[in-house]
Image: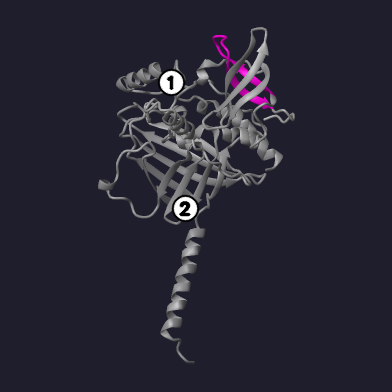
Amino acid sequence: MPSASPAVRLGAALLGLAIAGTAAAAEHPDFTGVWGNYRAPGAAAPQRGAPQAPLPLRAEAKAKVDAYHALVDSRGDTPGGWCLGTGMPGSMLGSGGYPMEIVQHESLILVVFEAHAEIRRIYLGERADEGDLFPDRNGYSFGRWEGNKLIVETTHLKEAVDQGRYPHSENAKVVEEYSLVVNDDGTKVLTSNMTMTDPDFYTQTITAEKKWQLQPGVRLLPYECNEPTWEEHLERLRQGQGEAVSSR
Amino acid sequence: MSPKIRMRMLLAVAIGLVPFAASAHHSAVRFDLTIRDNMVTGIVKEFAPANPHTKIVLTVTDEKGTRDIEYEGHSRNNYYRGGWREGMVKVGDKITLNAAPTRDGSDGGYALGVIAADGTKF
């Protein structure tokens, strides 16, 4: 039997690698798609403003959070009202009721929230060097697969007293465990169990569960928020009113 | 979009929108959102769908006279998911808002829903 040429052997080897890579990717659940808040069949709509259990905040942290609310609550100001993304963990726990889209790659999972076109990147490949990281509202997220579960650890967060439910310090660490199930009615449900550890702000570990359901046929819409302010600024410039509207 | 999905999106509007309705210029805290059946009819002077909120100016005539009143509304995205489409509301149209009134009784409100001139509700 004649032996294969080097080119043929190389092609076969590359094909083998490609097949192996595909198989490895297929071993993990695929979270790709547009997701909305999950509601169990027949369940009542959640009530806004329902009382929530007090948080186990340390005294200094509570003072910071209380000062923030004293400043903005009577005005109704929120980060979202100022076209600012929610940040972790609020982005992943609700994002204002708007859908989110997940695009899953082998070494990166992109989470695109419709609200404020906020983007969260979950890296699965090589962890970034510490010197290349800096604090951000969504922090730095690094994930790994454990069987069918995706474990995501988020650090390098900015202190955020403006988080709607779980304010935190810059030293907060969020660990999420994601799993995908298919309900009897065929609905794909993505569940995240979150644990936030933040000794600077809390006397106890914070836990929360969030469920999303796949929304076939739904597409994310553009969410440009600052355009009216920009247009207003341009109009004032056209009218010779100079810097009457300042950037923010 | 299937009716089931559209209904889910509408419900998302109902429960999730308002936190994004506050802006640098306006704030949902000004409105009494517990009042959900205050219907206001007027002539459209401006309809500017935007995120995080939509600006609606109607020329309204009531017992106080005729004047232009500015209303704040849901985000453009949520109006879209509720059935609004580009060109559906035009200057000069007679439309009706389901507008949560201001807490202090001044002119204005938060447009929880809109009935366009052709009867389309969103």
Which amino acid does the dot numbered 1 rest on? Pro
What residue is at 35 percent from the left and 20 percent from the top?
Answer: A62
Q: Position of residue A51 (x, y in %)?
A: 51, 19
Identify the magenta region.
B95-115
* A206 relative to B21 in the view: left or right: left
Mark 2 lies on residue = A147
Q: Quadrant of residue A154?
A: top left
Of the pair A227 and A193, the residue shown nearer to us: A227
Instruction: Tell me, for residue A54, which label it has, or none.
Output: 1
Of the pair A209 and A72, the residue shown nearer to us: A72
Query: In the rendered image of this protein, does residue A86 appear above or below residue A153?
Result: above
First in sequence: mark 2 vs mark 1: 1
What residue is at 54 percent from the left and 28 percent from the top?
Answer: B53
Q: Position of residue A221 (x, y in %)?
A: 56, 41
Tell me which secondary structure the magenta stretch mostly adopts.
strand
Of the pair A236 and A213, the residue shown nearer to us: A236
Q: Is residue A119 magenta?
A: no
Q: Residues within 10 Å of mark 1 (few under 14, many from 20)?
A: few
Q: Position of residue B47 (x, y in %)?
A: 60, 28
Label 2, label 1: how far apart the Cα atoms are = 35 Å
Camera sees residue B104 = yes
Which amino acid does the dot numbered 2 rest on? Gly
Confirm or deny contact between disc 2 and disc 1 (CB under 8 A). no
Q: Is residue B106 magenta?
A: yes
Judging from the image, what secondary structure is the residue with disc 1 in?
A: loop
* A121 relative to B71 in the view: left or right: left
Residue at mark 2: chain: A
